[in-house]
Amino acid sequence: MEKILEILNSIRSDIDFANEDKLIDDGILDSFDIVSIVGELCDEYDITITVDDMEPENFNSAAAILALVERLQDEM
């Protein structure tokens, strides 16, 4: 989780990612933020995030993002 939070904070340091759980639902992250996050996650974890993975529930919180990364790593 620490690396996920580090990535998220490098993109948007103004958000409390550790406690926010409606990043998409509340419009906290915009599409540019998501593209940046996806790029960083793919580079850091050597995963591929597809269009099918681009569901709001996968990006609503740091925990959801971590679950997505772990699932994609398990599928490799």
Image: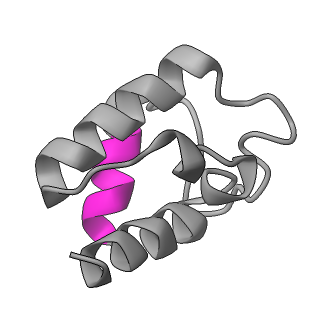
Q: Which residues are magenta?
A: 2-9
User: Residue at image x 50%, y 61%?
Assistant: 65
Quadrant, the N terminus: bottom left
User: Of 8 and 71, which appears nearest the observer?
Assistant: 71
Classified by dominant secondary structure, the portion drawn in magenta counts as helix
User: Of 74 and 66, which appears nearest the observer?
Assistant: 74
Pinpoint residue 62: horizontal percent, then vertical percent.
53, 61
In the picture as drawn, the residue positioned furthest to the top comes out as: 32
Q: How many marks?
A: 0
User: Residue at image x 59%, y 38%?
Assistant: 15
State yes or no: residue 3 in magenta.
yes
State yes or no: residue 21 in magenta.
no
31 sits left or right of 34 in the view: right
In the picture as drawn, the residue positioned furthest to the bottom comes out as: 74
Q: Is residue 30 above or below residue 61?
A: above
Pinpoint residue 50: horizontal percent, then vertical percent.
43, 45
In the picture as drawn, the residue positioned furthest to the right comes out as: 26
Pinpoint residue 59: horizontal percent, then vertical percent.
61, 51
Q: Quadrant of residue 2?
A: bottom left
Quadrant, the C terminus: bottom left
User: Residue at image x 58%, y 43%?
Assistant: 54
User: Residue at image x 14%, y 43%?
Assistant: 43
Q: Is residue 5 above or below residue 36?
A: below
Q: Is residue 50 above or below residue 27?
A: below
Q: Quadrant of residue 20?
A: bottom right
